[in-house]
Amino acid sequence: MRRALVPFCLALALLSPLAAADELTGDVSGAVMLRHNYYLERSTRVIAPEAGIRLDLPSATTIEAVYLIDAITSASLAAGALEDVAFTEVRHDVAARIEQRIDINGNPAAFGALIRRSHEPDYDSLAVSLMARAEMNQRNTAVGFRLNFLEDEVRQTFRGRDNTPTTMDFRERLSGVGFGMTLTQLLSRTVSAGGEYEIVVLDGFTANAYRRVVVAGTPLPEKHPDSRRRHSVAGRLAILFPAIATSLHVHMRLYRDDWKIRAITPELRVYHSLGESAHLRLRYRFYQQSAAFFHLETGEYQIDDPYRTADPKMSAFHSHTLGGQMKIFGRFLEAGRFPRLADLSFDLGFEYIFNTNAYGNGLITQAGMHIPF
């Protein structure tokens, strides 16, 4: 089972723009995206290849689909292991998006919908998002809105040394609804700023189906509140330095919820052009949060306590993320036999996470290819 609820907007990140429609010629354009993701921490390894395709139609309609499969290898009891033996669980994730671009009094706008379906042996998730965005003020200002819905089913599937799954008579649900808005403003030819607000309300089973808390010598199921209200505010400032072909992006995110968790996430990104065929991105991110109101550092819960947890994400902790990405474009092919591949690109990224909670440090690697047609 997923150890953390995937944010509603994760699917939006996976479905990043792949191509631009050729509405003038009436041709259909698009691209194919291939990507390999790898994540490793103390007790978990995730290998997640994905593939996507996008079509931009002459009618100013964009259709996109992404399929991801991840193999999660873990020996954690919180993931369904009966013994300290590694086992692998496979998750299938399919996302589809449609967007229609229109013109409102000379201002470009778009509205669309996204649906995402995820399945694994002990967890099913369905998420739907409705989105709208518009540009105005001679395209110097952009606003966006999104409405998200989530419906999950949680089950238990235990595995022993022979890795044979045993499904228990356990079935819980988690529902959610979220609303977000964004604003981006071009301040000058080299400076832009943006802001975002999001609220997410969850209702249902919010604990881990496997994790146990020892109470008076007896391991009991984890118990979290049945509802959670999350608020986040984020801002971004981007500055371009044309003389050195470099841009600086400063991000800040503030988070709070009714579990008394407070978090702050500053982030710094530097983009540098290495000529027409490559660019480099460097990234540093700091994250710090307070503990949930029901988290006990000692872990010594009493039998009459209404809530109990052994989730490291409910503790106070902080992390540092350092990494970078190299992206290479196929523009060197433009003058050769394959001019249509001039927009082809490859990217390779690496990040390391220094984490103070029980999950420990981790690393992330990514490799991707974008093939236009």
Image (cartoon, rainbow, N blue to C red):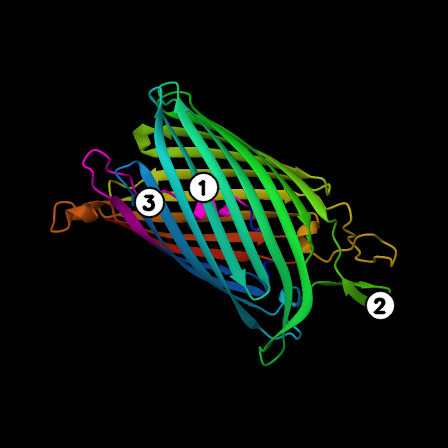
Q: How far is disc 3 from disc 1 in space, using C-alphas?
A: 17 Å
Question: Circle 1 sits on which residue?
Answer: 113
Mark 1 or 2: the one toward you: 1
Horizontal and vertical percent position of residue 138: 35, 19
Q: Quadrant of the N terminus?
A: bottom right
Q: Residue at x 20, y 49 (%)?
A: 341
Q: Residues within 10 Å of mark 3 (few under 14, many from 20)?
A: some
Mark toward the start of the polypeptide (3 vs 1) = 3
Residue farthest along the bottom direction in this orientation:
162
Q: Residues within 10 Å of mark 2 (few under 14, many from 20)?
A: few
Q: Are marks 3 and 1 in contact (CB under 8 Å)?
A: no
In the figure, is residue 263 to the left or right of 344?
right
Tag in front: 3 or 1? 1
> Disc 3 designates what residue?
18
Confirm whether the magenta stretch covers residue 11: yes
Question: Residue at 66% of width from left, 52% of height from top?
Answer: 313
Please give the name of the residue rendered at 61% of the width and 70% of the height, measured from the top-left corner: 75
> Helix or strand or loop: what does disc 3 sit on?
loop
Dot 1: what SS? Answer: strand
Q: Determine which quarter of the picture holds residue 180.
A: top right
